[in-house]
Structures are given as structure tokens and as C-alpha cells.
Image (tube, rainbow, N blue to C red):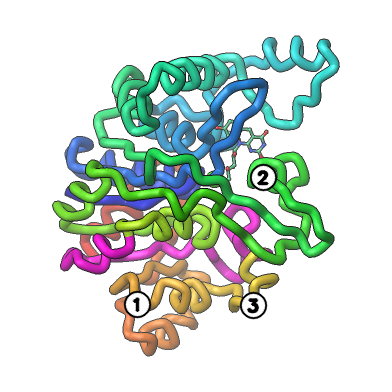
Amino acid sequence: MIVALAGGVGGAKLAHGLALSIPPEDLTVVINTADDFRLYGLYISPDIDTVMYTLAGIANPQTGWGVQGDTTNALEMIARYGRDTWFLIGDRDLATHVLRTELLSSGRTITQVTSELATALGVRSKLLPMCNEPVSTTIFATDGRVLEFQEYFVRYRHEPEVARVEFAGIDRAQATQEVLAAIRSAEFIVFCPSNPFVSIGPILNVRGIRGAIDASSAPKVAVSPIVGGSAIKGPAADMMRSMGFEVSPLGIAKYYRGIVNGIVIDNIDADLEENVRSLGLSVLVTNTIMNTVEDRQRLARELLAF
Ligand code: FO1
Ligand code: CA
């Protein structure tokens, strides 16, 4: 069993590469749910959906999130009612939010709901939300604003400078039996190239998960989401800077030191290899940019060999 910890787009791409390189049933993806939120009364779980659509082969290839070929009729109608439509929900994507919300209100856990939806879409790997309790990433901006993660990220295009991040509800969150069993049986644990603070961070902060990872004797490898001094996607670089971290794969290595045994950095950052190695980590230097499905699979295969 391989366990991959993942956030949204970057995590989904590598998880897809892994699912194509091993029997897909042998992959479990533990997914961040701290960016989940409610909109128009619907429960939206962006990182679960991004991983689910990607592994189902129906993700929008331009954005990495949302459904390929989706239309926006429902959202246009919502706009006609005078409502703000800053979060682009496609018509097909909307169906997922409607059913998830219905299944959750019938008393099922997010773990059960995710399993039902993913199975229906033909996903054979196991997709596990990091926990069943609600956790909500709250961004405290340096200008005093307090924002939900999607508001910060999408509505305000991750422009506000981040002073502090809080995972509201994390104290009540507990690792599920499914997540603990997956980590215990893992032969390899991959930290996908997702934002270490707001995607992997919440997962590691769920009670029981960090302990289970530490107790595992499986090799643990992180793929750096920072390539050549900037984030492949999203605000990881700005966040690292404003929180006093070095914006480089070395900064990522320092963040994950003590948790992982190895790190994968991009060819562009090859000059940092020795510095990272001197932290006591094994290093794989390769092309980490995943533009095509072949890239995902190649990186996954190199990771498995490493
Ligand atoms: N990201 C955007 O930048 N703009 C959007 O309008 C947007 C809509 C959206 C709808 C459904 C979904 O599952 C994801 C969506 N995302 C959107 C992606 C997303 O929420 C972020 O990329 C991640 O949360 C950051 O990791
Ligand atoms: Ca996310």
C-alpha cells in the first residue's frame, strides 16, 4: 500500500501518476479538507473534488480543478438573482456539491460520502478525507481581515498578505480508523507537491496522524512544491516569505525535516542538492513539473524507484 498526502491540483496530479504506475487499488490518498466551506447552502470540498475528478480522468485540463467541458448555466442564473458568483462552480461540478450535501445531511460521514462519490465515478484508489470533523482554514491578513481559505484564495486571488493561519476545529479533529489503517499498512508515504502550510499542514495536525506517520517504518518522501524560488501554483511562496521561511526547496526541506527521509527537488534547483543532503535527507533531483499525464507517470515511477 502506498499512502499519498495531498491537497488540490499538484497533489492530485502526482496521485494520478501513482495510480497509473501501480495497481490503483494499492494507492490511498489522504486529502486535506480544511479548505472545505459552504456556499449557497452547499457543502464544497475543493481538494477532495480535485483529486476525485483527476483520478476519474474528468478534471478540467486547463485549470486542474472542476470538470472538463463543464458549462456555467446554474451560476449565470444565480448571478441573475443578484448573487455574487466569485467561486466558479460548473453545472456538472454543482451536481457533486448537491449530492455531497444531501448525503452529509442524511448522517453519513465525509469519509463515507467521498467513498460513494469516488466509486461511482470509477475511481479505484481509496480517497480518504483527513478526518470526519469540520476543520476550517482561517487566514488572518496583515491588514486585519479574517478570511475563509477560499475567500482568501479565490475571491481575493491570494493577494492579501498572510500574517497567520489558523485551522479552526483542528482540536476536535481525530484521525479516522481508515486513515490510521492506511498509514499503518503503508510501504511508502508520499508528501505530494501541495502547499506545506495550508494543504499538508492541516493533515499533519489532525490528532493521531503525525504519530502514525512517525511510528511507520516506511520510507517517507516529500516532493517540493517550490521550484526555482516560486510556487508551481498558488500562494505557497508568498506564505513562506511572510511567515519567515526561506522560499526554496531548502526551506521546504527544513519544514519537513524530522518527518520525511527524502525529498524530491527540481532540476532547476540542482545547486541546492548538497545543502538539502546536509540536513540528513536523501535527495532526488529530477523534472518535477507535471504538464502532461506522461509527466505525472514519469515522476511517480522515479519516486517509486527512489
Ligand atoms: N480556484 C480558483 O482559482 N477559482 C475558482 O473559481 C475556483 C472554483 C472551484 C470550484 C470547485 C472546486 O472544486 C475548486 C475550485 N477552485 C477554484 C480551485 C480551488 O479551490 C483551489 O485551487 C484550491 O483550494 C487551492 O488548493
Ligand atoms: Ca486546496
Percent x, y for residue 5? Answer: 36, 52
Q: Is mark 2 within 8 Å of ligand 1?
A: no
Contact, CB < 8 Å: mark 3 with mark 2?
no
Label 1 Cα neighbours within 10 Å, binned few <14 / some 14-19 / many ≥20:
few
Which amino acid, mark 2? Answer: Glu
Task: Quickly name the residue at label 3.
Answer: 244
Does dot 3 land on a helix, a strand or a loop?
loop
Percent x, y for residue 124? Answer: 25, 30
Identity of the residue drawn at 46% across and 69% down: 267
**Quadrant of the image for the C terminus?**
bottom left
Judge by depth and name the residue closer to the eye, 36 or 221. Answer: 36
Which amino acid, mark 3? Answer: Gly
Q: Which mark is residue 102?
A: none
* Residue 294 at least partly seen: no
Horizontally, residue 189 falls left or right of residue 231, namely: left
Q: CA distance from mark 1 to mark 3?
A: 19 Å
Task: Quickly name the residue at label 1.
Answer: 258
Report the span colored magenta.
210-238
Give the vertical position of 71 relative to 7 (above or below). above
Quadrant in the rendering for residue 229: bottom right
Task: Quickly name the residue at label 2.
Answer: 148
Does dot 2 land on a helix, a strand or a loop?
strand
Quadrant of ligand 1 in image = top right
Give the vertical position of 188 relative to 135 (above or below). below
As for residue 304 lying within the magenta part, the answer is: no
